[in-house]
Amino acid sequence: MPEGDTIHRVAMRFQSALVGREIEQADAPSARSPIHTRAAELAGRTLERAEARGKHLLLHFSGDAVVHSHLGMNGRWFVRGDGRMPFGRPWLVLASGPAVASQNGGKILRVTSAARARNDPLLMQLGPDPLAPGFDPAAATERLLSYEPAVPVGEALLDQSLIAGIGNVIRIEACFLPRVSPWRRIADLTAEEARGIVDATSWVMETAIAKGSRPKQIYGRDRRPCPRCGGRVMIRGQGDDNRVTYWCEGCQR
Ligand SMILES: [Zn+2]
């Protein structure tokens, strides 16, 4: 499932394959694409920058056009340099020479302007992104400690206005590493534990970028013993969206 690290990796692939190039073909073959009638406007423009902000991707084109994309639960980007066109009917295809990018499915896909993207309420409310240059872990720790006191930490971490880019795997692992139960209320976190969660979040995301997959110690381990203490790994839904949550009852308090 796409989380912040996924989108940063997509932006990096755009950077090496398509940034600086003029888009020769822009198309939205799927009639279900939200930009089915607008994709062609991108042809002839140069892709100037690919920017990941949490789970959002912004593609900045010459002539003041921006593509704003969010993959949601099931969307996918493919970016390749071998000239092969994507299968099926993508929501967007951008091609230049042998470089081809396509998005299939997703929650958001729109063409907008730089000014509108800057003032987009969804983007403006995003919290700091651990993968962004200049991320300040002390400030992020303060944000976590001053979140709604009664909310369980595992639920708070899904709020993109707290820290941007965290998804289900990252939040589970970020609680496991500093031994904090995702069910603990924010009010009951120590400053040291909150800092541990922030540092673990950065570590999981940076490792995912470096290795190409997220390091998972407890996610998906129900019915198997905890790798740290041998205790029982529990599973239950959490929050309004009932997100699947793993924790060890032996070593997470
Ligand atoms: Zn354990």
Image (cartoon, rainbow, N blue to C red):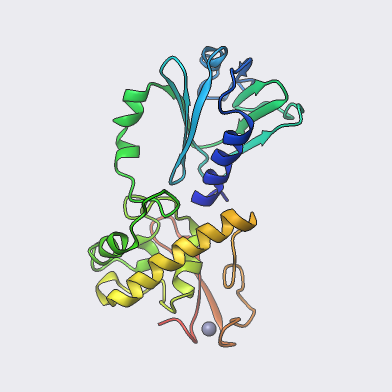
Q: Is residue 229 above or below residue 58?
A: below
The residue positioned 58% from the left and 51% from the top of the image is 1
In which quarter of the view is residue 193 placed? Answer: bottom left
**77 left or right of 142 in image:** right
**114 left or right of 22 in image:** left
**Which sits in the foreground, 111 or 130?**
130
Residue 189 seen in the figure: no
Quarter of the image with the C terminus is: bottom left
Residue 86 on image: x %, y %: 72, 29
The residue positioned 63% from the left and 15% from the top of the image is 24
The residue positioned 27% from the left and 77% from the top of the image is 188
In which quarter of the view is residue 150 placed? Answer: bottom left
The residue positioned 61% from the left and 68% from the top of the image is 220
Residue 71 on image: x %, y %: 52, 40
Residue 167 on image: x %, y %: 48, 55
Q: Is residue 98 above or below residue 197?
A: above
Residue 170 on image: x %, y %: 50, 61
**Which sits in the foreground, 113 or 16?**
16
Q: Is residue 86 above or below residue 184?
A: above
Give the number of callouts.
0
Residue 70 seen in the figure: yes
